[in-house]
Image: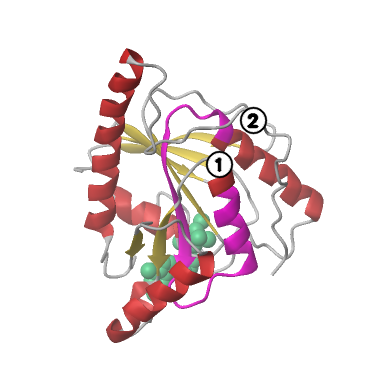
Amino acid sequence: MVIKNVQLETVCGITSVLPVNEKPEIAFAGKSNVGKSSLINALMNRKALARTSGTPGKTQTINFYNINDALYFVDLPGYGYASVSNSVKEKWGKMIEKYLKTSGQLKIVFLLIDIRHEPSENDKNMYDWIVYQGFHPIIIATKLDKINRSQKDKHIKIIRDGLQVVPGTKIFPFSALSKQGRDEIWDYIDVVCQLTDEVKVVEQRNSSTETDIEIQVGEDRSNEPEVMIKPE
Ligand SMILES: Nc1nc2c(ncn2[C@@H]2O[C@H](COP(=O)(O)OP(=O)(O)O)[C@@H](O)[C@H]2O)c(=O)[nH]1
Ligand SMILES: [Mg+2]
């Protein structure tokens, strides 16, 4: 993808109305400080459009970045802030849930995990919860430059086993320093956005066709779990 034009188009707070976009959306979730802003900047070829910091920020928002008027990156609030009250966490859980349920354009949910560490309880809860919402999260293992190259496969396996990912789930190792993994992630985004267009055409012809590529949200939500994100 040649990045011609990117802009932060919409910033949503807890009470905001979520935008109804007509282009594909790619969402990014992960613990605060995992490297989400750095990844988004690297994918957009921008140094600092998405804010990066060594200390987790206080402002929690859902940010929609318009890429070339062709798709959106959706930066979801990071979890794992020990200092945030439970009621705030609950509100944010509801906000993310509302987004996952109502976006008609969400094609990929990337969940970011620091390649150095075994997934935390919060990471596992987030993974399971995204699956419950009807998505198969794709994992991006961040900060690849911080481990020895020979340790990469071992760490990827620890993440795969720790999250008990859906079999066949892709895990992309990535470094914001070396940009390793960037092209692979873009290739995946390109392929999925095109595939989904084809799937949509098939669905219009035969509305009962089920597909395992996308995001079928069930109707019965009576047993729905609450988002449980605990302080770390
Ligand atoms: N070495 C290294 N540091 C990274 C990488 N990605 C992010 N960081 C650092 O980790 C910290 C948090 O990154 P940030 O992108 O703000 O994380 P966010 O809170 O998930 O958005 C910052 O100090 C970044 O410079 C990476 O791939 N390699
Ligand atoms: Mg950030």
Q: Which residues are magenta?
A: 101-130
Q: Position of residue 51 (x, y in %)?
A: 48, 54
118 is within the stretch colored magenta: yes
| Point 58% across, 31% down: residue | 218
Q: Is residue 46 visible?
A: no
Q: Earlier in the sequence, mark 2 or mark 1?
A: 2
Ligand 1, by image quadrant, is: bottom left
Residue where numbered disc 1 is placed: 62
Residue where numbered disc 2 is placed: 16
Residue density around tag 2, few if under 14, some if 14–19, many if 20 or more, within 10 Å: few
| Point 62% across, 39% down: residue | 97
Q: Position of residue 14 (x, y in %)?
A: 68, 38
Is disc 2 in contact with disc 1, using a CB cutoff of under 8 Å? Answer: yes
Q: Is residue 112 above or below residue 120?
A: above
Residue closer to the observer: 119 or 61: 119
Question: Can you say which quadrant of the picture contains the N terminus?
Answer: top left
Callout 1 amino acid: Ile
Q: Position of residue 199 (x, y in %)?
A: 30, 28
In which quarter of the view is residue 108 placed?
A: top left
Q: Is residue 171 visible?
A: yes
